Amino acid sequence: MITDNLIRLIESGQAQYKVHTIGIGGSSAILVPKNNYIVIIDFSFSHFIDRPLIAPEDLAQLMDNSVHFVEFRSKGNAFSYCMRTNFLPVLNKYVMPVNNAEQYNTYQLHKTDCHIDIWRMEPRNSWTYTYGILPDKTNEDSKPTGYGTIAVSNANTLLDFRFAGFIVYYPFGALQSQNGDTFYNTFRCPITSFNALIPIDSAFTGVNYTYPIVNIGYVLVNHPFDKNNR
């Protein structure tokens, strides 16, 4: 989302609008020159499944690989997104994503190089999770507004979700007992050898639907970040 202050900087020659495209792999970066900063104003994510369908029995594995995380990260800043791709298997040879590319308007400010990482959801056989009653200190509203904090109203409330048994997603964060675990209170699993993107196979018929494409629009501002210049 381009704002009036950014338009003024561009029109006064203090900034330039740029587009950065990444694809093929799961890791890339926008380099930010010294004494400059960037504002990412939008990006589009083209859906993909990063494992080819070689035989009918691989469909379950493909479904495992239909959820991806995307993160923009610089020193002191991180913006995380989760995407789910809908797809159709075609002749048991390749997959056809049926989601259109998703467009996101943002205002991400990065004062150092911005690293973009894309990875898969951890496989289902690594999941463990707990449902139950939220503690009173969460202050969750009772039904019909919220899930509440008594058994009759929230027997199906997610309390925690463990990825590979050691990283925990707590929807209510520090308000719940962490038992010494490493935890997030945003839905995000770590990047491991199990869910880093699979290298592409150029011999595969549907290779163009097995890797990410992300188009990123941003404004490069030609001076250090200073609130007086915004």
Image (spheres, rainbow, N blue to C red):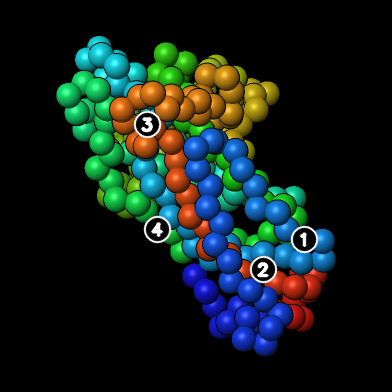
Q: Mark 3 = which residue?
A: 207
Task: Give the alpha-carbon distance from disc 3 to disc 2, as whole Å.
Answer: 33 Å
Disc 4 marks a residue whose amino acid type is Gln
Earlier residue among tags 4 and 1: 1
Residues 139 and 116: in front is: 116
Q: Do the CB atoms of the residues marked 3 and 1 lie less than 8 Å apart?
A: no
As helix, strand or loop, the secondary structure at mark 4 comes to strand
Label 1 packing within 10 angstroms: few (<14), some (14-19), many (20+)? some
Marks 4 and 3, how far apart at CA: 23 Å
Q: Which quadrant of the figure has residue 55?
A: top left
Amino acid tagged 1: Pro
Mark 4 vs mark 3, foreground winner is: 3
Residue located 82% across and 61% down the image: 34
Tell which of 153 and 37 is nearer to you.
37
- Residue drawn at 67 percent across, 76 percent down: 15
Q: Which residue is mark 1?
A: 33
Which of marks 2 and 1 precedes in the sequence? 1
**Is 57 left or right of 150, judged from the image as shown?**
left
Q: How far is the residue under mark 4 from the one under mark 1?
A: 26 Å
Kindly indicate whether the residue at mark 2 contacts the one at mark 1 (C-beta within 8 angstroms). Answer: yes
Seen in the picture, residue 97 relative to 168 is either above or below; the reply is below
Question: What is the three-letter code of the residue carrying label 2?
Answer: Leu
Separation (CA) of disc 3 from disc 1: 34 Å
State how far apart marks 2 and 4 are (Cα): 20 Å
Q: Secondary structure at mark 3?
A: helix
Q: Nearer the viewer, residue 208 or 178?
A: 208
Pick the quarter of the image with the C terminus: bottom right
Q: Which residue is mark 4?
A: 103
Identity of the residue drawn at 67% across and 68% down: 220
Residue 79's spot in the image, x, y percent?
58, 50
Q: Is residue 172 left or right of residue 5?
A: left
In this figure, which residue is indicated by the disc labeled 2? 220
